[in-house]
Amino acid sequence: VASAASVFDDEDTFKILIATDIHLGYLEKDAIRGNDTYTTLDEILQCAKQNEVDFILLGGDLFHDNKPSRQCLHKCLTMLRKYCMGDSPVRFEILSDQKVNFNTTQFPWVNYQDENLNISIPVFSIHGNHDDPTGAEGLCALDLLSASGLVNHFGHSHSVEKIEISPILIQKGITKLALYGLGSIPDERLYRMFVNKQVSMLRPKEDQDGWFNLFTIHQNRSKHGPTNYIPEQFLDDFLDLVVWGHEHECLIKPTLNEQQLFYVSQPGSSVATSLSPGEATKKKIGLLRVKGRKMKLQEIPLKTVRQFFIEDVVLADHQDCFTPDTPHVTKKVEDYCFAKVTEMLDEAERERLGCRLTPEKPLIRLRVDYSGGFEAFNTSRFSQKFVDRVANPKDIIHFIRRREQKEIKDESSIDYGKLFKPTAVEGLRVEDLVKQYFEAAEQKVQLSLLTEQGMGKAIQEFVDKDEKEAIEELITYQLQKTQLHLQSRGVTTEQDIDAEVRLFRDSKKNTAEEEKDIQEAMNRAKAHRLERGDGDFADQDVSDVNMDSDEGSVPVAAPTRGRGRGSRGRGGRGRAEVRAIKRSSKAGRGRSQKSSTTSQSRSIFQGRGM
């Protein structure tokens, strides 16, 4: 990392503004925090224009929702047009094949070279896990910005079997920059592909040592499970700098990986999307200067970000003030918490002095550990005391209770349901909860037809992206494939069917075929939604919809489907599916019989002329 500023800021120096995880549109309907993300994006773009950067590099999650609202898209387009279009010349050229670099658009060239556009600051962005491509077309919100000519979307891999990351080769004066990007991919799948040597990074044919290699990635960096992250050691050692998105804690100062000998910069998010310690670090963006093979990263604190203070209190550590046996102990605890919150508000006020751009009301979170016999007080009543002073009055206090660690001697007596039950689910993903449930569940409620990964993905689509038919469509699709498999194998007896179904299911676990099946089922779910007239980027507030209602959501000719969230059962679906196959086998080749599930199953011999 270069230390002398004198070698920079000339015609051979790239000036790049880097930012990740802007989460545009987060809580946009909130009366207090609704404009936070828009205000901060405006500051980021304004900073880019003031510093006369060559381009902006975004590391994913520009949008918080996979289907951003009309208001969100309008504000984003307006700001990009305001700051990124103009007469200022672009002083670098692209040497690589742009049809390979920008393969998600019908205009496969960088936007500033489009004769119909007048771009002064190009924006290059990969997609994140919040705004990832979905549907049969594999489109995301970034593709709308790309089609409009305001953003250059790159790093989209279309294959689930092999990933080749081809760099955008850029030159400015004597400096040559190879820009690599990889949009968000499920961590377990990408981890497996790295292990199986299915990920490769292409390099320029000529003068490989003369390029500065910059890589942008959007994955878990910290370890959330055995394979639910991407170790830095997986990345190629020829890289010079990795800009790591997805992680919200701001660790923007480049740190050297001692094994691979490249630097990693983690800019973090520009808005707090959860009240966790990682979000409390001061939010920053970076101004990266690159000349030859040298670089310098200037940290730029964001002034429009809402302040966030978090503190932990363990009541058992304050025996001098109160104990569980103290008279009126709950009132004393509440008074103590009131004093703590007041202190945090006073600190926020002192920090905000002289900075008129910082929002007036801060975010406050006090995590109270009331283990050891203490009782929780009424948080709603407590919050009313600060309703005019904080931005999050409804969730200032978060009570937690530590589980006692007991030595377990007999594995057969373990109650895994209690062992895995969390006191709080902050930061846990839907698919993680599904996986944990089936790992701890008894054998009689295990899935027999679907895999845990498939069910987890379907539930994630249902919860995160409101794909109401994702679960049912996955079941229907796998049921059809299993019936065809049993028919081709000539299996007829109930015992053989049960064994063959399990073998067929296990043979596809953690394979590319499983990924394709899941994606195909999700595409079918989206196709059904589009047939009903639901758009890709709906502007409807989900909280205003009765999710348990069928009214107006299913065509008249469609079979009856259970739509309630509770109708899916807690994992017992798998056995019901296999029983449906058995019954349809016994019912005869020409008959169709309705199963006990919400889907309609057919005979395994249907459709083959037998």
Image (cartoon, rainbow, N blue to C red):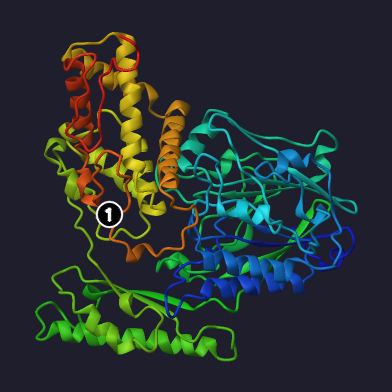
Horizontally, residue 527 falls left or right of residue 441, namely right
Residue 277 in sight in this render:
yes
**Residue 476: image x %, image y %?**
32, 32
Q: Is residue 24 visible?
A: no
Above or below: residue 574 compared with residue 542: above
Pick whichever, 443 or 67, lies toward us.
67
Amino acid type, callout 1: Glu
Q: Position of residue 312 (x, y in %)?
A: 34, 73
Percent x, y of residue 539: 46, 63
Q: Residue 215, image x and y in percent?
A: 67, 48
Above or below, 472 relative to 57: above
Quarter assignment of residue 573: top left
In the displayed structure, would residue 560 be above or below residue 84? above
Q: Quadrant of residue 472?
A: top left
- Label 1, on which residue? 551
Q: Residue furthest front?
A: 556
In the structure shown, which secondary structural element does the residue marked by tag 1 occupy? loop
Which residue does the image show at 18% across and 26% down from the upper left? 579
What residue sits 21% from the left and 17% below the top?
585
* Rendering quarter of residue 577: top left
User: In this figure, what is the number of numbered marks?
Assistant: 1
Q: Is residue 283 left or right of residue 427?
A: right
- What residue sits 65% from the left and 39% below the top? 236
The quarter of the picture where the C terminus appears is top left
Q: Please state, as top left, top right, bottom left or bottom right, where the N terminus lies in the image.
A: bottom right
What residue is at 51 percent from the left and 76 percent from the top?
A: 35
